[in-house]
Amino acid sequence: MKVGDLIKIIRPSIGIPRDTVGLVLDVVFSDSGFRYFQIQMFGPDPIIAGRTRRYLGRDLELVSEAKIN
């Protein structure tokens, strides 16, 4: 996954249900070697829409790849 990809959350968390759609904003590498993805959420619920969270790649499913040149 890379910046600009459209994803779906496959592991629910507090306030963010499973199958929520989001956009990858950034890829962050931690000191421990993990790669996190900063995700901006979309949806009809105003509490979820616009919220950003970090997820591991195993918690995300790629919906559509970005076509950035």
Image: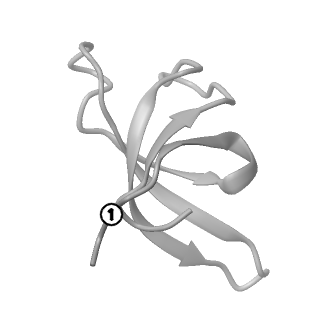
Q: Which residue reaches farthest bottom?
A: 31
Could you tell me which residue is drawn at 53 percent across and 34 percent down? Answer: 8
Q: Residue furthest top?
A: 45
User: What is the quadrant of the C terminus in the image?
Assistant: bottom left
Residue to which mark 1 is pinned? 67
Left or right position of 46 against 64: left
Q: Amino acid at mark 1?
A: Lys
Q: In this figure, what is the number of numbered marks?
A: 1
Determine which quarter of the picture holds residue 43.
top left
Residue at the spot x=53%, y=75% of the render?
28
Look at the picture and state if 67 lies above or below 59: below
Q: Position of residue 51 (x, y in %)?
A: 31, 39
Which quadrant does the N terminus fall into?
bottom right
Q: Nearer the viewer, residue 16 or 5?
A: 5
Residue that appears at 56% across and 25% down: 14
Secondary structure beneath disc 1? Answer: loop
- Residue at image position (54%, 21%) is 19
Q: Please rate how many residues cluster around mark 1, counting C-alpha atoms within 10 Å: few if below 14, some from 14 to 19, many from 20.
A: few
Decide: is 61 above or below 20.
below
Within the image, what quadrant is residue 21 found in? top left
- Vertical placement of residue 18 versus 42, above or below: above
Q: Residue 32's spot in the image, x, y percent?
A: 79, 80
User: Vertical placement of 14 versus 5: above or below?
Assistant: above
Q: Position of residue 55 (x, y in %)?
A: 60, 51
Q: Please state if 28 lies on the left or on the right of 4 as rendered.
A: right
Left/right of residue 26 with respect to residue 30 in the rendered view: left
